[in-house]
Image (spheres, grey):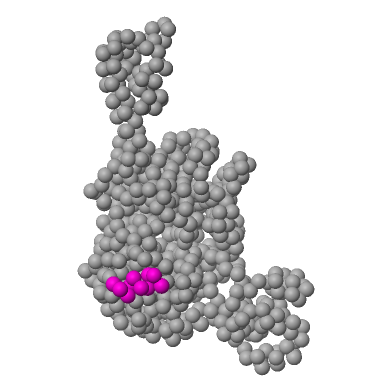
Amino acid sequence: MKEKIYQILQQYWKYNSFRPLQEEIILSVLSGKDTIALLPTGGGKSVCFQVPGMAIENGMTLVISPLIALMQDQVMNLKRRGISAAFVNSTMHPKEVEKVIQNAIDNEYKFLYVSPERLETASFVEILPDLKVGLLAVDEAHCISQWGYDFRPSYLKIAEIRKHLYNPNIPTIALTASATEKVIDDITDRLELKSPNIFKQSFARKNLHYIVLYETNKIDRIQRIIHKVGGAGIIYVRSRNKTKEIADVLNNKGIRSDYYHAGLSGEEKYFKQQKFIENEYQVMVATNAFGMGIDKPDVRFVIHYELSDSIESYFQEAGRGGRDLKTAYAVLLYSEADKEKLWRMYEESFPAIEQIKSVYNHLCNYYELAIDEGEGMMFDFDIRAISELYKIPMNLLFHSVKFLEMFELITIEDEHYHPSQVFIELSKRDIYDFYLRHPEYEEIIKVLLRSYDGILSQFVYINESEIAARIKRDKKFVVEQLKFLDKEGILYYRPMTGLPKITFLKDRILLSKLKLNEELYYFLKERRKFLTEKMIEYAEQKHTCRQEFLLHYFDELNTESCGHCDVCLEKKRLKNIETIKDKLFEFFQHYNQSMSIEEICNQFSQYSKDLVIQAIREMIDDNLLRCDEKDRVFLN
């Protein structure tokens, strides 16, 4: 089996060796054991289920992934390697979903990616026994735990789903980049794993230098860091407006920068990501919406403009630096104002239970749902329009929606950019009959058939602007014609809206009968308070090595100081000053004569001038040395 997995690694990934623990994890899976893999960001988690997925000859791997961007990125990478893969998510046309599912039943894929919410739909549960699943992979497995920082209730259904597989005894691999012992126990229990093999790679990143700076003039500090470190970098901020503001300042200073946040259209997000990956911009200023699925190994610095809301999210975001194993810097800037802001955000993150109920009612009204209807219905989710219509502050609406997801009433999935798509299911004879009756559509149909191979058998990506140029009309005309043809059933047209999707998981409930899980609400509130306290503690503490603090948080106790974080460097600096003081005292005792500061620095040239001067000042303060009116130093 070892020979086989090395052959697969070389054939598809072009590597001759595995990264630490990958081989052991893969062999555990292939021996039929349930497996938990904890690897830091950039540790190569996907290979741990993709290689065994290729080695299992009869059957595909069903991958549960929470982010559309992540699953689309992984499917695209697999296809580039010549591996058959597909995904199913809420942004797809029903006909496209139907086609993918049928292909999966026909065993045409080695990997099928689905969101955890998709697993809950009755239609998907029905077809599970027909899928030849040989391996179940649960990515971002920490989402299953209420002790985790990103709890998603839909993950709790995965254990039940396993029972519907044609072979419920296939191995499961659960993967995460950040989990404490409590979270690992939760993953084991809630996925109902059977005596799993647990592989935990040290979260230590020797090439990543953690630095915390108390700073009020952050923009100046950021510019100095960029000029000193060089290379590509990410700056994380909390405010969408701040992303553009900082990017504009940096551009004006000659630093090529762009900005990114969840409020951008899917198309904008896609092109901004690509330009950053291809080094058209040196710096991406972004909210935490940026990063997942972004495969850029040469990020030299990750700067957090403010405190993160948890150690887990900070650790994961900082870990996007230096994935090529070369030196990178994770810099956290903070001030007193940031601490106050973090506590304020903690309070805002928990709207009152009655406010959450009210938002639920507004959503049902907005989408015109009657009592006892709505289950499975999906709509574009325009949070700004809803906020303005019902005069709900955006923050309150956002956090209330998060809790409605938590209480399993709705689910929200972000739209991820892809070009528009078209699929013509009719035969060529039927198409010919149609444009004999409707000659005004003949031109566009012929352009589609000539320009896009495979359009009669599957969805293909199209470009409305290119089609418009070919028929010498404007884009609006093309879109209107495609929409008409879709309505008439001649083709399936899926334009990209750029808006997230909201799906109602249950029928509308009368407000007076709506019961929310208050026990879960207050548990999560206490948990968030703990996470906030630990984040502030990380920033403020000056005694423990930064990396050791992070590792201890993740229950990794047998650690050593990294030697290059700001705490370690300060300890080294203080130790050097003490050494210099001892040597200065011996030197003056031996020579017993005065010297200028410059002469002393020359005498101790093996140390930096700043350290020598600091040592002299401290010895003068301690009355061990004196300085005369000519600025000559001598033993007191």
Coordinates of residue 451 in the picture (x, y in percent): 67, 79
Q: Nearer the viewer, residue 92 or 280?
A: 280
Residue 458: x, y in percent?
56, 82
Q: Disc count in the image?
A: 0
The residue furthest left is 195
* Residue 8 within the segment the image draws in magenta: yes
Q: Is residue 358 above or below residue 4?
A: above
Front position in the image: 54 or 177? 54
Coordinates of residue 296 in the picture (x, y in percent) = 48, 57
Task: Tell me: residue 163, above or below residue 553.
Answer: below
Q: Is residue 285 visible?
A: no
Q: Nearer the viewer, residue 296 or 62?
A: 296
Q: Quadrant of the C terminus?
A: top left
Residue 554 visible to the viewer: yes
Q: Quadrant of the N terminus?
A: bottom left
In terms of secondary structure, what is the magenta stretch mainly?
Answer: helix
Q: Residue at x 51, y 82 (%)?
A: 99
Left or right: 282 as drawn, with respect to 441: left
Residue 574, how many percent across, how many down?
A: 32, 29
Q: Magenta residues?
A: 2-11
Which residue appears at 25% of the width and 63% of the height? Answer: 198
- The answer to whether residue 363 is magenta is no
Q: Residue at x 33, y 83 (%)?
A: 166
Between 234 and 18, which is closer to the camera in this rendering? 18
Is residue 585 depicted above or below 366 in this figure?
above
Residue 474 vs 520, above or below: the answer is below
Query: Which of the 4 quarters of the picture holds residue 509?
Result: bottom left
